[in-house]
């Protein structure tokens, strides 16, 4: 399901003893990693949520959403998301603008701007390379199919004697 049931009992024991509140539905998507963690080790999951609530002074729903995002995204991407939130909270449009703005305060704006431009160029080159390779593979496989459509993907190479 694409919905989280907050404060729902994992095994029903807490609910039977009256230790948990009634369930409430929230439209917060929970991915497979977070769901697995919550079901496989609910004590540790709840411990982390409660620590996060104390440390960041947030509600349980916000702490749970943040921890679920951490579980679903590899730490690198999670850190990028947090960095972007940080720079947006400082009033910058995005992470790159924030990095440049903060570096300019230290007098390193040109250096950081150059590094970001190199990063963007390398990223574009990689993206176009992947697209080009994908297109070439598609064209190659299509040509193999057109040579001998009756025997395509049945094993072996196409029969070139009939051409």
Image: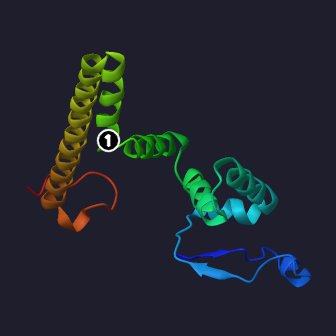
Number of labels in the image equals: 1
Residue 12, percent from left and from top:
83, 80
Question: Foreground residue, 78 or 20?
Answer: 20
Residue 41, percent from left and from top:
78, 59
Quadrant of the image containing the C terminus: bottom left
Quadrant of the image containing the N terminus: bottom right
Residue 100, percent from left and from top:
30, 28
Determine which quarter of the picture holds residue 49.
Answer: bottom right
Colour option used: rainbow
Residue picked out by circle 1: 92
The vertical placement of 152 against 18, above or below, is: above
Answer few, some or many: residues within 10 Å of disc 1's Cα (few below 14, many 20 plus, some between 14 and 19).
some
Residue 27, percent from left and from top:
52, 76
- Asked whether, in this view, residue 80 is left or right of residue 157, the answer is right
Q: Residue at x 50, y 39 (%)?
A: 76
- Asked whether, in this view, residue 61 is left or right of residue 85, the answer is right
Determine which quarter of the picture holds residue 7.
Answer: bottom right
Q: Residue at x 45, y 42 (%)?
A: 86
Determine which quarter of the picture holds residue 37.
Answer: bottom right
The vertical placement of 73 against 145, above or below, is: above
The vertical placement of 77 against 4, above or below, is: above
Q: Secondary structure at mark 1?
A: loop
Question: Foreground residue, 53 or 126?
Answer: 53
Q: Residue furthest left?
A: 163
Q: Residue at x 60, y 81 (%)?
A: 25
């Amino acid at each position: 399901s694409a919905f989280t049931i907050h404060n729902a009992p994992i095994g029903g024991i807490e609910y039977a003893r009256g230790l948990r509140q009634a369930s409430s539905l929230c439209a917060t998507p929970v991915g497979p990693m977070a769901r697995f963690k919550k079901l496989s080790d609910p004590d540790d999951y709840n411990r982390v949520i409660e620590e996060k609530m104390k440390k960041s002074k947030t509600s349980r729903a916000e702490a749970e959403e943040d921890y679920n995002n951490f579980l679903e995204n590899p730490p690198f991407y999670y850190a990028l998301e947090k960095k972007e939130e940080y720079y947006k909270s400082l009033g910058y449009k995005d992470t790159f603008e924030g990095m440049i703005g903060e570096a300019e305060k230290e007098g390193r704006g040109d250096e950081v701007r150059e590094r970001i431009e190199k990063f963007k160029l390398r990223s574009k080159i990689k993206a176009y390379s992947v697209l080009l390779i994908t297109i070439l593979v598609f064209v190659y496989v299509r040509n193999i199919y057109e040579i001998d459509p009756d025997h395509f993907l049945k094993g072996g190479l196409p029969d070139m004697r009939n051409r």
